Structure formats: structure tokens, C-alpha cells
Amino acid sequence: MTLLTWNHACTVSVRAMDDQHGILMDTMNELRLALVHGADGEQMSELLGRLIEFMRMHFWSEEQLMEQTGFPGLAEHRAEHEKLLAQVRESAHRAQRNECVGMRPLLGFLRDWYVEHIEGMDQEYGPWLNQRGIS
Ligand SMILES: [Fe+2]
Ligand SMILES: [Fe+2]
């Protein structure tokens, strides 16, 4: 599994959201490095907890912006966020119970989700917000 790097396709043209996506990426890379360097279950669990907390905050920020501007795809986007968060929470619990066994597939899943969601669904709100003066 390689580290995530920022590329052009990642930008959603809303500065605050790009910054948050960067922090999410850094935290996922931190998790990956911790795993490679043999971090124990407790350390992994703490990092995962931090990632989940930040994801929750980030999703809330995006949803607030979409809500404030009446973005038509909000309900669908929110449902996707909720589904993802539930999946990550559940995988994290499973991985924690097995003391790191299963951490690798979890990180793979997170990376795939990150790229797919940011390069997919998150791209849709960029132009809408830009047209309403949020960039
Ligand atoms: Fe996002
Ligand atoms: Fe999103």
C-alpha cells in the first residue's frame, strides 16, 4: 500500500474543504506509517479515533456549506457520508478487537474511499459553491 499524495484531481476548488481533505490524507498516511513501523494496538486505536473524529467534523462542514446554499444533492451526499462513517467505525471496532489484525484491509478500504469520494461526489459541490461566492 502506497502513501497518498495530493494531485490535481483532488481539489474541489473550495479552500477550506481542500485544507480538510489534506488533513484527512495526512492522517491516513500517518496510520499507514504507524502500521509499517509496528505501532501497537493502542497507538493504532488512538490514531483511528482521531481520523474518525476528523472525518465526522469534515462531513459536517461540507453538509453545512451545502445546506446553506441549498445544494440539490445534499440528501444523497449526506447519506453517503453516514454510510461511510458507519462502515469505518464498524471496521475500526473489528480491527481493534483483533489487535491490529485486519488493520491493513481497513487502511486499503479507507484509501479507496478517500480517492473515490473526493474525486467523485465531492467534485459536484465545488462549482455550485463557487457560483455562490464560496471558494
Ligand atoms: Fe470531503
Ligand atoms: Fe463529501
Image (tube, rainbow, N blue to C red):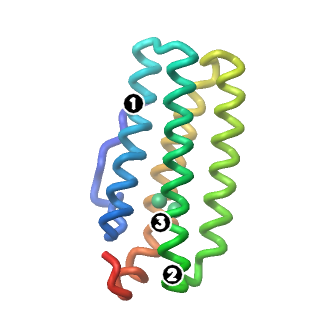
- Location of residue 100 in the rendering, given as x and y in whole percent from the top left corner: 60, 18
Residue shown at the point (71%, 38%) measured from the top left: 90
- Secondary structure state at the residue bearing disc 2: helix
> In the picture provided, is 78 more to the left or to the right than 58?
right
Residue receiving disc 1: 30
> In the picture provided, is 72 more to the left or to the right than 19?
right
Which residue type does callout 3 highlight? Asp
**Res 60 → quadrant:** bottom right
Residue shown at the point (33%, 62%) measured from the top left: 11
- Secondary structure state at the residue bearing disc 1: helix
> In the picture provided, is 122 more to the left or to the right than 73?
left
Mark 1: C-beta under 8 Å from nearest atom of ligand 1: no
Which residue type does callout 1 highlight? Glu
Find the distance from the CA under tag 1 to the CA under tag 2: 33 Å
Foreground mark, 1 or 3, reads 1
Residue receiving disc 3: 122
Foreground mark, 2 or 3, reads 2
Of the numbered discs 1 and 2, the one sitting upstream in the chain is 1
Foreground mark, 1 or 2, reads 2
Residue receiving disc 2: 68
- Location of residue 34 in the rendering, given as x and y in whole percent from the top left corner: 42, 21
Which residue type does callout 2 highlight? Gln
| Crowd band around label 2 with a 10 angstrom C-alpha radius: few (<14), some (14–19), many (20+) | few
State yes or no: discs 2 and 3 in contact (Cβ < 8 Å). no
Mark 3: C-beta under 8 Å from nearest atom of ligand 1: yes
Residue shown at the point (38%, 87%) measured from the top left: 132
| Crowd band around label 1 with a 10 angstrom C-alpha radius: few (<14), some (14–19), many (20+) | some
Residue shown at the point (67%, 35%) measured from the top left: 91
Of the numbered discs 2 and 3, the one sitting upstream in the chain is 2
Mark 2: C-beta under 8 Å from nearest atom of ligand 2: no
Between 60 and 12, the residue placed more toward the observer is 60
